[in-house]
Image (cartoon, rainbow, N blue to C red):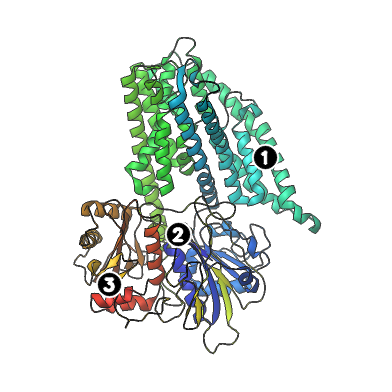
Amino acid sequence: MTACPTGIAHTYMAAEKLAQTARSLGHEIKVETQGSIGAENVLSDNDVRNADGVIIAADKDVDRSRFVGKKVLVVGVAEGIRHPEQLIERVQSAPVYGGEPGDGAGGGAAAASGGTGGSGGTGGGKERSVAYKALMNGVSYMIPFVVVGGLLIAISLAVGGHATPEGLKIAPGSFWEDVNNIGTIGFQLMVPILSGYIAYAIGDRPALVPGMIGGWIATHGELYGMKDASAGFIGGIVTGFLAGYLVVWIKKVKVPRFAQPIMPIIVIPIVATTALGLFFIYVLGKPISWVFTHLTGWLSGMTGTSAIVLGAILGLMIAFDMGGPVNKTAFLFGSGLIASGNQTVMGMCAAAIPVMPLGQGLATLIRRHLYSDQERETGMAALFMGLFGISEGAIPFAAARPAQVIPANMLGGAVAGALAGMAGVADAVPHGGPIVAVLGAVDGVPMFFVAVVIGAVVTALTTVALVDVAERRKSGARAGVGGGIKGSAGGGAEVVAAADAAVTAGGASTGVAGPGGAGPGVVEPVVAAPGVAEPGVAEPRVAEVAGVGAGDGAEAAAGGASRTAVAVAPVPAPAAVPGQGREGEAVDVDGVETAGVDVSGDGHGVDGGSGDSAPSAEVLSGYLTEQTVKTQLDADGKEAAIREMAELAAGTGKVADVDELVRVALAREAQGTTGLGEEIAIPHAKTDAVTAPVVGFARSADGIDWGSLDGTLAKLVFMIAVPEAAAGDEHLRILALLSRKLMDAEFRARLQSAEDKAAILRALGEID
C-alpha cells in the first residue's frame, strides 16, 4: 500500500517502482494506492489472506486492523521509490502484526516518523512526526464544528440580536434563540472533537472516548474550580495527547488471553477516561484556576497605568488562547468594569476580540498558496465570524500552526488594544467586534474601526511572513534529506524528498482521516496493481503493498515468505483511471490483469498502445494538444521556461492573464521545487488566470536547473494550469497520471527521442 500526505506524485511513483521491481524479481504483487484521485486496486480479504507479507509505504496513518496476523513492514513512501527491492526482501522476515500500534517492522506511525520502535527497525522513510499528524488530525475534524457553530451564532446575532448591558442578547423563546443554541452546541463540541481525534491518531479507537471526555472537561472550568473560564482549546490539545499516549501505554500491559477481547472496548476506555479526567481535575485544573485568579488580581492593579500599555496587555491576553483562561481573564476584567462606569477597558477588549479571525482570514487571501483548500474555506468563515466578534474562528489556524499563528495574533491584538486605549474607545456591552459598533454600543466608532483594521492587517502580514519562513525551512530540510537520491530496480526515478512540495498545486492538500480511514469529504479507497510473474520462474511470489490513507494505520501479515502484499495510497473521491473500469474492474493487457498501474514491463501504458499507434490530437483528457507541445524550449532558466510555457498555453485561448499565471507558478516554486528528478519538472498553478484546464509539454536539449533533489537538469517539462473553480482535484488527477507514467524509463526515453510533435503526442497518448 502506498500513500503520501498530498496523495499525488509520490503515491503513484512508489506504486510503479514496487510493481516494476517485483516483476523483475519474479514476484506477483498487488499494489493498493490511496491517492488524490481515490483509492485504487483495493486489497480484498482474499488478497490479504493469501499474501505472505504486507508493505505499507506511506507517510500517513492507516487502519491496520485488516492485517492482523500477517507480516507487516511499515516505511515512509520515499522508501518505496528509493529501495523497492530491499523492501520486498525485508518484508519476508518482518514481524507479525498483532493489532498493537508498535507491531510490524517499522513500528507503525512512530517508526515512519523516524523513531526506532518495533523490531525490524524503521523503514528509513522520512515523514511528519506522530505528534504533528495527530494534531492535524484533530484540527481537520474540529474545523466543521467551528465553521457551523460560528456561522449559526453569527447569523442569529446579526438577525435576532440587540445590544443590552449584559451583551448582545436574543429575545427569549424566539426562532433565532433556537438557531443560536444550535450553534452554541457546535462550539461546545469543538474542543472535545479536537482532543478526541488527536488521541485517536495516537492510540487508535480505544483513545477516542478518553480524548473527547478529556476535551469536554478542559472546556468546563466549573469542574476544577473556574466558574467563568476554562482551559480552552489549549487544554483540549493537552488532553488529546495525554489520552492518546496513556492508551498506548496501557496497551503494552500484558493481560490474560481471556481478557484481551474486552480490553479495547471496555477496559482501556474506562481506565484511560477515569485516570485522565481525575488527573485534569485534581492536578492540572488547580494551577489553571490559580493562574486565572492571580491574573485577575494583577489586572486590577493596572487600572491606573497608561491606557496604551493597558490596552496592549489586554490585547495580548485576548489573542493568546481565544476562550482559554488568559483570554477570559481579560474579557471578564473589561466587562466587570462596565457596571462601575469604566467602559474604556471593555473598548480595548472589544477592538482586540475580532482581530484574530479577521487577521487569519485575511492571511488566507493574501497568500493563498500557503494554505490548503480547506484552510482557505475556513478563512472565509473566520472573516465572517470576526465581524461578529467570535474569536474562536481563528482556533483552527492556531491549533494547526501555533508557533506562527499565536504570536501573530498576539501582536495584532496588542496593536488593536493599544490604539483603542490611546483613542479612548468605549464599549457599553460585554461583547466585541464590528457588530457592537453597528448596533450603537461603541463610543468612538471611527477609531474603533481603525484599531480593528490595523490590528487585523498586522496579524495577517505577520502570519504569512512566519508561515512562509517556516515553509521555506521545511523545504530546505527536505532538500537536505533527499539530495542525491537515485534510481533502483526497474529504472524508475528515485527522487522522493521533494514529495510534498513538488506535487501540491495552489496549496491543495489532503485532509487527515480518523476512524474508518477517510477524513471529511474524503473517500477511503485502495487500488491494487497486480504484477506479472517473470516467465520461467518457478513459484512466483505475490507482493502486496499496502498503502496508507489519511488518518488510518496500515497493518500486515504473517505466513510464508513467498507472497507480499503491497498497497499504495492517496485519498480524494475515486475517479476513472486509464485502463481501469468505472467500478474499479481491472483491464486485461496481454493476459495480465492490471488496475491502472503499468506492470507490463514494455514501457507502454495499460492500454497497451505502442509508439507506432496513430497520434492523438488530444491527450490527458484533451488538456494537452498539439498547440501546447513544443519540441525545444528556447529558455535556459526556470523563470524564463515557465514564462515560455505560459505563453505556449496562451495559444489555446484558455489563458486570460499570462503574467498572473507566471506569478502563481513562480510562487508555487518558491514554496518548493517542482523538479521531480530524473530530468523531469512539472510546474503547476491553480489560478483564475486560466479559464479552463490546460497542460503544456516542452523539451530542453541542454536541461534547465530546476533545483531537483537528485541534481539533474530538467529536460522534460510539463506545465499544468487549472482555474480556481476547476472540478475538485482535476489538477491532482493530471499530476497523478503524469507521475505514474514518468516512472517508466522507456517512456521517458521515447519522449526524449521523439522527432516531432506528432511523435511526442503518440508517446504522451500512452498516459491516457
Between marks 1 and 2, how big is the CA–CA gap?
37 Å
In the rendered structure, the answer to whether residue 267 lies left or right of residue 686 reads right
Rendered-image quadrant of the C terminus: bottom left
Query: Could you say which is closer to the camera, residue 131 or residue 622?
Result: 622
On the image, numbered disc 2 is attached to which residue?
36
Query: Could you say which is closer to the camera, residue 98 or residue 579?
Result: 579
In the figure, residue 598 lies in which quadrant? Answer: bottom left
Q: Which mark is residue 276?
A: 1
Mark 3 closeness class: few <14, some 14–19, many ≥20 residues within 10 Å: some
Label located before the other in sequence (3 or 1): 1
Q: Give amino acid for label 2.
A: Ser
Between marks 2 and 3, how big is the CA–CA gap?
27 Å
Q: Which mark is residue 617?
A: 3
Query: Could you say which is closer to the camera, residue 761 or residue 74?
Result: 761
Rendered-image quadrant of the N terminus: bottom right
Mark 1 closeness class: few <14, some 14–19, many ≥20 residues within 10 Å: many
